[in-house]
C-alpha cells in the first residue's frame, strides 16, 4: 500500500495552497495532511486486523485520490472565472501558450481554501464510510461465524455477613450441645476422630467476608441447539454455596464448572418455545423457591419442558393471543450419587405441571404443582464387621433430617463397644409434593407487587418402615411425622434492578419441619442451612448504576423441635452483573 508521503494528492494540495497564501496555505496544507494521515492510518489498521485486505485498501485510497484531484482542479479553476481572468492568445518563443491569471483577492483565497478543505474532508470521509458500509467493516457479519455465535455473561457479589447466636443456645463445646457436625463426623469416621470439628457452632458470633464470582459462555450452535457453560467460585464439596471466603491468604480461590449443558429449543409459528430440553449439568428447571432448592444448586442429568398456548376465546392452542397464557409440563431425571453397587445408585426423578396466565393489564399469575422422588436415598445398616453399606451415607448434608448410625465395625482395641464408631445416613424416604403460586401485580409498573406462596409435603415418610430400618435408634429426633413446609412472601418495587434508583423491598416467612425436604439441598443461608426451622427474612435492594446494586437482609430463625438454636443473620451485598 502507498504511504501518505508517496501520494500525489497530498503533494498537489500542499503546492497549490502554498502558492496562493504562503503562511495560511501551509497551515491548510498541514490540516489536509493530518486528515490524510488519519484516513490512511485508519485503513492501515483495518488491514492489520484482517477486516480489509491490501488490495481493497489500495483501491480505496486510489479512488479517494482520483476524486480529490478532480475536485481540487475544479475548485482552483473557479477564481479565474470569478475575477474576470482572460486567457490571451499569446505564446512563448517555443510556441507554448501563456495563461494569465488576474489578481485574486485575499478574501477569495480564504474562501477557496475553506471550501477546498471542507469538500476534500467530506469526499475522503464519504469514500471511507461508503466502503465500510458496503464491506461491513467492524460489523458482526465481517467476523468469523463461530465468534458471532458466542456471548459471555457473568456476575460478581461481595458479601459481609454477621451471624448472631441467641444467649439461650447451648455453648458450642458444652455438654448440652447436641448439634453435631454430621458431615465432619462421617468424613472422619466417628465423633472421637472428628475432635472439636464434631460440633456445630451454637454460641460464638461470627463476622466474615465472602465473594461469589460466576462467568459463563453461551454458544449458539444452530437455530435449535445451544451450549451453556459456567465456572464459579465456591467449595468443591458444596452443591449449595458458590461463596469463597476472603482473608484466606494461604490458598487461592477454588473455581469449578457448575454448568455445562446442551440445550435444544423448538419454536412454533406463533413464536412459542413449545419444547425445551437441557442435558448435562443444567440450571434449576423447576418453578420453585429456595425452601426446596437453594439458588446456587445445579442439576446433573436431563430435563425438558413442553408448553402449550391457551386462548379460551377461540379454543385451546389454536389461535393464541399476544398475552402470555400457556400451560406447561416439566420433567427431569438426575443422578445424585453412583457408588460401586448398582442397587444403591441414587436418582431424583420429578415432574411439574403448571400454567402462566397474563391479564390485560400485564399482571401475571403463575402456579405449578410438582412431584419429586428421591430414589435409594435412605441408608442401610452394615452387618457386624462389614462396611459394604457405607456408600449409602450421603456425600453432602446440612442439618435437620432424621438420621441413624449405619456403622457396625467397632475397633477391637480402642473402641470394642463401637460407641465411637459413627457413620450417619438418612432414615426416611423423600417423595415431595410441592405446590407453588405467585401473583405479579403490574398496575403500578414499573413498580410491581408480587405475592408468592410455597407448600411442600414429604409423603414418603413411613414411621413403621423407619422403625424397621433403624431399629428405633435415631440421632437427635424421635421417629415422628414432621414433614410439612410452608412459605409465604411479598415483594414490592422493580422486578429487576438494572438502573440507578431502582429499588425493591421484600419480606417472607417460612416454617420448615425437619423431614419436609432434603436438608442437603435447601437454602444454605436461612438458619445457616438445613431444616427444622422457622422464622422470617426482610430485605431491600437499591440500584447504584446500570447492572449494579446493593442488598441488605435481616434473617431471624429458630428451631422447631430440636434443642434451642436461635440464629440471626445480617447480610450486606454489593452486586454487579454483565
Image (cartoon, rainbow, N blue to C red):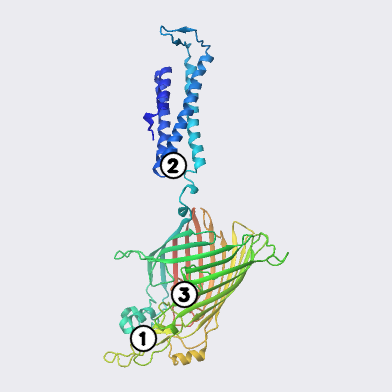
> Residue 468, percent across and down?
47, 92
Quick one: quadrant of the N terminus? Answer: top left
Work out whether residue 156 or residue 100 is closer to the camera in this orientation and state it: 100
Secondary element under disc 3, as helix, strand or loop, is loop
Per the image, the residue denoted by label 1 is 422
State the CA–CA distance, disc 2 to disc 3.
54 Å
State the CA–CA distance, disc 3 to disc 1.
23 Å
Q: Earlier in the sequence, mark 2 or mark 1?
A: 2
Work out whether residue 223 or residue 97 is closer to the camera in this orientation and state it: 97
Work out whether residue 104 or residue 69 is closer to the camera in this orientation and state it: 69
Secondary element under disc 2, as helix, strand or loop, is loop
Q: Is residue 56 visible?
A: yes
**Figure check: 144 above or below 355:** above
Which label number is shown at residue 521?
3
Residue appearing at x 51%, y 37% in the figure: 130
Residue appearing at x 53%, y 11% in the figure: 84
Q: Earlier in the sequence, mark 2 or mark 3?
A: 2
**Figure check: 286 above or below 267:** below
> Residue 86, percent across and down?
51, 10
Badge 2: residue crowd in 10 Å (few <14, some 14–19, many ≥20): many
Per the image, the residue denoted by label 2 is 52
Q: Is 271 left, or right, of 474 in this rendering? A: right
Q: Is 178 left, or right, of 82 in this rendering? A: left
State the CA–CA distance, disc 2 to disc 1.
71 Å
Amino acid at each position: 500500500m502507498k504511504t501518505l508521503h508517496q501520494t500525489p494528492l497530498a503533494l498537489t494540495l500542499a503546492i497549490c495552497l502554498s502558492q496562493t497564501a504562503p503562511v495560511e496555505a501551509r497551515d491548510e496544507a498541514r490540516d489536509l495532511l493530518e486528515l490524510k494521515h488519519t484516513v490512511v492510518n485508519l485503513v492501515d489498521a483495518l488491514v492489520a486486523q484482517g477486516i480489509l485486505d491490501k488490495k481493497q485498501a489500495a483501491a480505496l485510497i486510489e479512488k479517494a485520490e482520483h476524486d480529490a484531484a478532480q475536485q481540487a482542479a475544479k475548485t482552483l479553476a473557479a477564481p479565474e472565472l470569478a475575477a474576470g481572468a482572460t486567457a490571451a492568445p499569446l505564446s512563448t518563443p517555443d510556441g507554448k501558450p501563456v495563461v494569465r491569471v488576474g489578481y485574486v483577492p485575499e478574501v477569495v483565497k480564504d474562501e477557496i481554501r475553506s471550501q477546498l478543505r471542507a469538500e476534500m474532508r467530506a469526499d475522503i470521509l464519504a469514500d471511507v464510510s461508503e466502503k465500510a458500509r458496503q464491506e461491513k467493516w467492524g460489523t458482526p457479519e465481517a467476523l468469523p461465524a463461530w465468534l458471532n455465535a458466542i456471548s459471555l455473561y457473568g456476575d460478581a457479589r461481595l458479601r459481609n455477613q454477621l451471624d448472631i447466636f441467641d444467649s439461650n443456645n447451648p455453648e458450642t463445646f458444652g455438654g448440652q450441645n447436641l448439634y453435631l457436625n454430621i458431615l465432619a463426623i462421617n468424613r472422619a469416621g466417628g465423633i472421637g476422630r472428628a475432635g472439636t470439628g464434631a460440633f456445630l457452632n451454637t454460641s460464638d458470633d461470627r463476622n466474615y467476608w465472602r465473594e461469589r464470582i460466576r462467568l459463563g459462555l453461551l454458544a449458539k450452535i444452530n437455530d435449535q441447539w445451544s451450549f451453556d457453560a459456567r465456572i464459579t467460585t465456591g467449595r468443591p464439596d458444596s452443591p449449595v454455596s458458590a461463596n469463597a471466603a476472603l482473608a484466606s491468604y494461604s490458598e487461592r480461590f477454588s473455581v469449578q464448572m457448575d454448568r455445562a449443558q446442551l440445550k435444544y429449543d423448538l419454536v412454533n409459528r406463533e413464536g412459542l418455545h413449545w419444547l425445551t430440553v437441557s442435558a448435562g449439568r443444567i440450571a434449576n428447571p423447576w418453578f420453585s423457591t429456595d425452601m426446596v432448592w437453594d439458588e446456587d444448586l445445579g442439576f446433573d442429568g436431563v430435563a425438558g419442558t413442553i408448553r402449550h398456548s391457551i386462548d379460551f376465546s377461540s379454543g385451546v392452542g389454536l389461535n393464541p393471543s399476544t398475552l402470555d397464557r400457556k400451560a406447561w409440563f416439566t420433567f427431569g431425571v438426575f443422578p445424585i450419587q453412583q457408588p460401586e453397587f448398582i442397587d444403591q445408585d441414587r436418582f431424583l426423578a420429578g415432574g411439574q405441571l403448571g400454567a402462566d396466565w397474563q391479564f390485560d393489564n400485564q399482571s401475571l399469575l403463575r402456579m405449578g404443582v410438582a412431584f419429586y422422588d428421591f430414589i435409594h436415598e435412605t441408608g442401610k445398616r452394615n452387618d457386624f464387621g462389614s462396611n459394604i453399606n457405607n456408600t449409602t451415607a450421603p456425600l453432602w448434608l446440612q442439618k435437620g433430617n432424621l438420621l441413624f448410625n449405619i456403622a457396625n465395625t467397632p475397633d477391637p482395641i480402642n473402641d470394642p463397644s463401637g460407641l465411637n464408631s459413627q457413620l450417619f445416613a438418612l432414615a426416611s424416604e423423600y417423595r415431595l409434593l410441592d405446590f407453588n403460586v405467585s401473583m405479579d401485580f403490574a398496575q403500578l409498573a414499573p413498580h410491581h407487587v408480587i405475592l408468592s406462596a410455597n407448600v411442600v409435603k414429604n409423603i414418603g415418610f413411613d414411621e413403621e418402615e423407619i422403625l424397621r430400618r433403624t431399629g428405633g435408634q435415631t440421632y437427635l429426633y424421635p421417629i415422628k411425622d414432621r414433614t410439612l413446609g410452608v412459605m409465604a412472601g411479598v415483594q414490592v418495587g422493580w422486578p429487576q434492578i438494572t438502573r440507578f434508583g431502582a429499588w425493591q423491598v421484600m419480606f417472607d416467612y417460612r416454617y420448615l419441619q425437619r423431614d419436609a425436604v432434603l436438608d442437603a439441598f435447601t437454602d444454605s443461608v436461612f438458619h445457616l442451612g438445613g431444616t427444622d426451622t422457622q422464622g422470617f427474612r426482610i430485605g431491600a435492594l437499591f440500584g447504584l448504576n446500570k447492572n449494579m446494586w446493593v442488598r441488605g437482609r435481616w434473617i431471624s430463625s429458630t428451631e422447631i423441635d430440636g434443642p434451642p438454636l436461635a440464629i440471626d443473620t445480617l447480610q450486606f451485598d454489593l452486586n454487579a452483573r454483565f
